[in-house]
Amino acid sequence: MTDRNAMISASANLRGRPNDGILIVTTDEVPGHRIAKVIGLVRGNTIRARHVGSDILAAFKTLVGGEIDGYTKMMAESREQSLDRMRAEAHARGANAIVGMRITTSTVMQGAAEILAYGTAVVIEKE
């Protein structure tokens, strides 16, 4: 599977994601807007475990080299799920934007990783 096909496949599984109008930025400010209210920290996470079948294919791929498409797809879906959960928390708390957004990963146990998206929920207004 090519990189493009892996990306298309991953995006196909993300249809139906929320369209709540919440702007997410990695910067601390949004150009042309002012922060009218700081709501606070919001976060979303997911923990994913690898599949034994994927591990066997991945082990083979390490011998011949190249991208491990199954893991690329799993990580892309995990990031989007974490972002969706963070967005849902911000929406529930009345925010219309998230500033200073970051994504981090950590190993929970052998074969399982946590993806955590976090940022500051705010209400922004046009200047």
Image: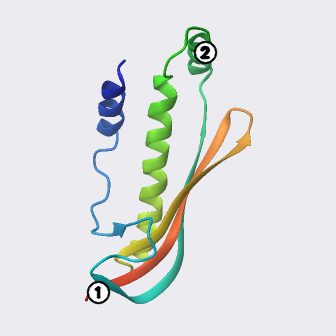
- Residue 42 x/y as whole percent: 52, 71
Check the image and report above or below for 6 versus 27: above
- Residue 18 x/y as whole percent: 31, 59
- Residue 22 lies in quadrant: bottom left
For residue 9, the mark is none
Q: Which residue type does callout 1 highlight?
A: Glu
Secondary structure under the numbered disc 2 in the rendered image: helix
Number of numbered markers: 2
Q: Which residue type does callout 2 highlight?
A: Thr
Residue that appears at 36% across and 35% down: 10
Secondary structure under the numbered disc 1 in the rendered image: strand
User: Distance from label 1 to label 2 (Cα)?
Assistant: 50 Å
Residue that appears at 47% across and 64% down: 86
Residue that appears at 42% across and 81% down: 122
- Residue 29 lies in quadrant: bottom left
Check the image and report above or below for 91 versus 48: below
Check the image and report above or below for 14 versus 19: above
Q: Residue furthest front?
A: 31
Circle nearer the N terminus (1, 2): 2
Instruction: Please name the residue that numbered disc 1 is placed on.
Output: 125
Check the image and report above or below for 72 versus 105: above
For residue 62, the mark is 2
**Residue 22 vs residue 67, the one in the foreground:** 67
Q: Residues within 10 Å of mark 1 (few under 14, many from 20)?
A: some
Q: Residues within 10 Å of mark 2 (few under 14, many from 20)?
A: few
Left or right: 117, with 55 as reference point: left
**Residue 31 vs residue 94, the one in the foreground:** 31
